[in-house]
Amino acid sequence: MIRDQETLNLLLDTVSRFVRERLVPAENEVAETDEIPADIVDEMREMGLFGLSIPEAYGGLGLTMEEEVRVAFEIGKTSPCFRSLFGTNVGIGSQGLIIDGSEEQKQRYLPKLASGELIASFALTEAGSGSDAGSLRTRARVDGDHYIIDGAKRFITNAPEAGIYTVMARTNPDIKGAGGISAFIVERGTPGVSLGKIDKKMGQKGAHTCDVIFENCRVPARNLIGGVEGVGFKTAMKVLDKGRLHISAICVGAAERMLDDALRYAMERQQFGQPIGEFQLIQAMLADSKAEIYAARSMVLDAARRRDNKEDVSTEASCCKLFASEMCGRVADRAVQIHGGAGYVSEYAIERFYRDVRLFRIYEGTTQIQQLVIARNMLRHASV
Ligand code: COS
């Protein structure tokens, strides 16, 4: 759903210019220093990027899903680490509050998330519980008007920068699966919260992940999201339905960028007396990539519109994440191939993108988890 085409076009133009003129030229520096320059972060704040999906009532831009994925198509055209910094505020870090939080919780946190003053992160994964998120072991015990949280979360995006953590923890140890899990907001600086060392990743330099450890951490009961125990897993799944659409749109943008780079290289690079783009075997790789990007883009837009129409898009979000992230990996591989030896050295952006986009097939649910969600939903619907 697009509410006002003219305003949206203005935002898309601004974001697209920001990507071309500010972010793309900074890619190498960020990859080398592992830090996004402070002036770029300030510009992101000013543009409202941290609050893209946060309702206007709390200071955000309140974009619909379709509007958000169109912005993500543009942002995807540069290093994924830039999106990662504000992505948790737009998606997994804030959506638990937006979807299931109480009015008081929304008022307390959303305005600061929308402005980018506060960074949010989503703490679901643990060392022993990745794809099997329902088996998580972090505990939260009631103690008067507080909960005491003990446990450790792993690979938490933006944890080093975050001011709040959305933490999924087991409040009922008698229920082993999803039903015993609740979601909390834990503020940085709460006694008992500590961070592990920043992970050394394959790619996405400039985006940081680390462990978040809770030891005897006292959290006020008012920080239980929505004030209801036992629904934290469902909150997390609803958050991921939306997050998977957003990531799919980023995959489309990244694939467009890589194909654009490969096309330019194919037009410039001469072999056998002509640009390699004139050879049909190169053309096949360009054409397959173009067609697959178009398919993913169409899927993402369709699913986003369905979500705006209040349809349950769990299946569609997983279809998009599955197809778009795998497509992005294939495009990355072909783009390296078109660059030949030059694609294997860091002089060209494709070497970095090839490593950066590998994560898309893993985080916010692996390809295999998307397959499982899609097939389960099919079987469930067929049996009613
Ligand atoms: N929206 C709302 N509720 C949902 C839901 C969704 N998309 N998906 C599941 N639920 C509900 C189910 O309806 C069920 O509720 P009832 O018990 O009331 O019926 C409950 O949640 C448990 O669901 P399910 O039985 O399907 O849970 P499983 O433990 O079998 O796990 C998967 C389901 C594997 C899909 C889930 O653990 C998952 O998505 N894993 C991947 C986690 C992930 O993406 N991690 C990435 C790190 S976060 S960046």
Image: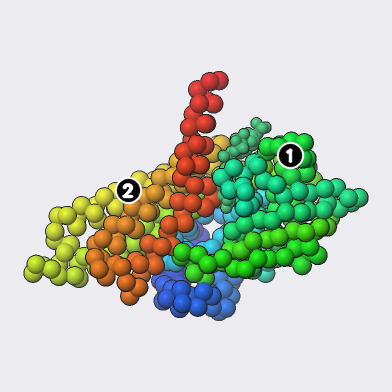
| Residue type of the residue flagged with mark 1 | Gly
The residue tagged 1 is: 180
Across and down, in percent, residue 298 comes to 39, 46
10 Å crowding of disc 1: few (<14), some (14-19), many (20+): many
* Residue, disc 2: 292
Q: Which mark is residue 206?
A: none
Q: Residue at position x 25%, y 68% from top?
A: 341
| Closer-to-camera residue (10/76) | 76
Question: Is residue 81 placed above or below 369 in the rendered structure?
Answer: below
Neighbourhood count class around disc 2 (C-alpha, 10 Å): few under 14, some 14–19, many 20 upward: some
Callout 2 amino acid: Glu
Tell me how far mark 1 sits from mark 2, CA to CA: 41 Å
* Element at label 1: helix
- Measuring 13% from the left and 68% from the top, which residue is drawn there? 271
Say which residue appears at 50% left-offset and 36% top-offset: 372
Q: Can you say whether 176 is above or below 26 in the image?
A: above
Q: Residue at x 54, y 50 (%)?
A: 364
Residue 198 higher or lower than 293, as above or below: below
* Viewer-side residue, 215 vs 295: 215
- SS at badge 2: helix
